[in-house]
Amino acid sequence: MDNYSNTLEVKATSDKIYGALTRTIPLWWSEMFEGSSAHKDDVFTIRFGDNIHKTMRVKEVIPGSRISWYVEDSLIAIPTLKNQKEWIGTTIVWEMEQNESSGLLRLTHVGLQPSIECYEVCSVGWEQFISSLKLFLETGKGNPYLKNGI
């Protein structure tokens, strides 16, 4: 299985990366954030306007090392997609390591594979928000989806 995967080096500690993935998601992914993402079994929803949302349950939290989220609900209401709920049942896994001068972050979206309809648009989305996460970790300011859609 070729799940979507991306690894990046960031000028941040694994603890800082962990904090961004558990406590400050609205600062790099989407300002339209509801719920909590800090502890196992927490549930949160992110939105990108009225037509796209994802609700995730935190399945695993190992501080400074690994986080996983299970997608319980999702809607990607893009007219060209026939299956707008493809994220449901997928798992997003974040793994982090500390090097001497930087941190290494690996994202694997288990279930987001080239064979599914939204792979291309979702891969582009991940690239955008991983870049925002890196920027947030290195400068303190990310480029999240804004509530006003800009």
Image (spheres, rainbow, N blue to C red):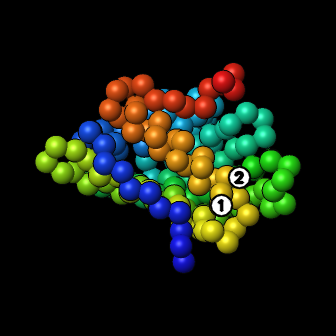
Q: Residue at x 59, y 54 (%)?
A: 123
Pick whichever, 104 or 23, lies toward us: 104
Q: Position of residue 47 (x, y in %)?
A: 67, 38
Q: CA distance from mark 1 to mark 2?
A: 14 Å
Pick whichever, 89 or 52, lies toward us: 52
Give the number of the mark in front: 1 or 2.
1
Q: Position of residue 134 (x, y in %)?
A: 39, 39
Pick whichever, 43 or 88, lies toward us: 88
Per the rendering, the mark at residue 78 is none
Pick whichever, 55 or 110, lies toward us: 110
The N terminus: image quadrant: bottom right
Q: Which residue ends up furthest to the bottom in the rendered image?
A: 1
Q: Secondary structure at mark 2?
A: strand
Q: What amino acid does circle 2 point to?
A: Ser
Image check: 61 left or right of 127?
left
Judge whether 121 appears above or below 135 on screen: below
Displayed quadrant of residue 120: bottom right
Per the rendering, the mark at residue 74 is 2
Judge whether 16 appears above or below 42 on screen: above
Q: Position of residue 82 (x, y in %)?
A: 84, 60
Image check: 16 left or right of 126?
left
Q: Residue at x 13, y 48 (%)?
A: 100
Can I make out residue 37 in this image? no
Compare marks 1 and 2 and give the one earlier in the sequence.
2
Q: Secondary structure at mark 1?
A: helix
Q: Give neighbour class at mark 2: few <14, some 14-19, many 20+ (Cα, 10 Å).
A: many
Tag 1 residue:
119
Image check: 96 left or right of 109?
left
Q: What amino acid does circle 1 point to?
A: Tyr
Can I make out residue 121 in this image? yes
